[in-house]
Amino acid sequence: MSPALNRKDLQRIFEKLDKSGDGFVSLEELNRLLHRIGVEFSLQELESLVGKPRLDLDEFLSFYDSISDHHNVNGGNIIEEEEEEEEEEEEEEDGDLAKAFKVFDLNGDGFISCEELESVLGRLGLWDEKSGQDCRRMIHFYDTNFDGFVDFEEFKTMMLRTVSS
């Protein structure tokens, strides 16, 4: 294995590539990675190279070992480049979430109160007087530090859970 990436790093990359969460990286998932870094294979070529339609973690590590010694793109390791790209995507996602957070944080104090949530939902036509209790429940559910407000990290968790549901 490359000295830059240890087994734990590679396992984390494997888990990020495993979009379906089934414990395997499919050739489609692997091919997306290769395509992003400019290595073009048809699925048939990739299956011929890999020898099977999907890889478990150990097989992925072996595949990494086989390509890390032979393939560099622009002087960098392709797995490291994928990790950097994923970090950039996370930063971009955080930027979008920060913009959304500011819409709800009406007073700019870095927290969303029940009143702020009600106000924004009301402007959007998604809240009425009968729904007030739901806003308090929502704040309480995502308020992991129990301060009565939703901070950015709690908002991020709320939004990511909502999107993945």
Image (cartoon, rainbow, N blue to C red):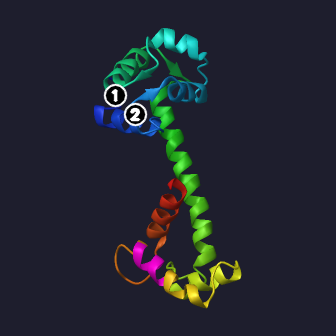
Relative to residue 3, is residue 71 depicted above or below? above
Mark 1: few/some/many CA within 10 Å (<14, 14-19, 20+): some
Residue at the spot x=57%, y=63% of the render?
97
Most common secondary structure along the magenta stretch: helix
Q: Secondary structure at mark 2?
A: helix
Residue 35, image x, y percentages: 60, 26
Q: Residue furthest front?
A: 130
- Dots 2 and 1: beta carbons under 8 Å? yes
Magenta-colored span: 136-141
Q: Which amino acid type is shown beneath numbered disc 1?
A: Leu
Q: Is residue 96 left or right of residue 57?
A: right
Q: Is residue 48 visible?
A: yes
Bin the neighbour count of mark 2 within 10 Å (Cα to Cα): few under 14, some 14-19, many 20 and up.
many
Q: Quadrant of residue 41?
A: top right
Toward the viewer: 99 or 136? 136
Up-down: is 51 above or below 8?
A: above
Rounded to the nearest whole Å, what is the CA distance between mark 2 and mark 1? 7 Å
Label 1 belongs to which residue? 57
- Residue 14's label in the rendered image is 2
Quadrant in which the N terminus appears: top left
For label 1, the SS is helix
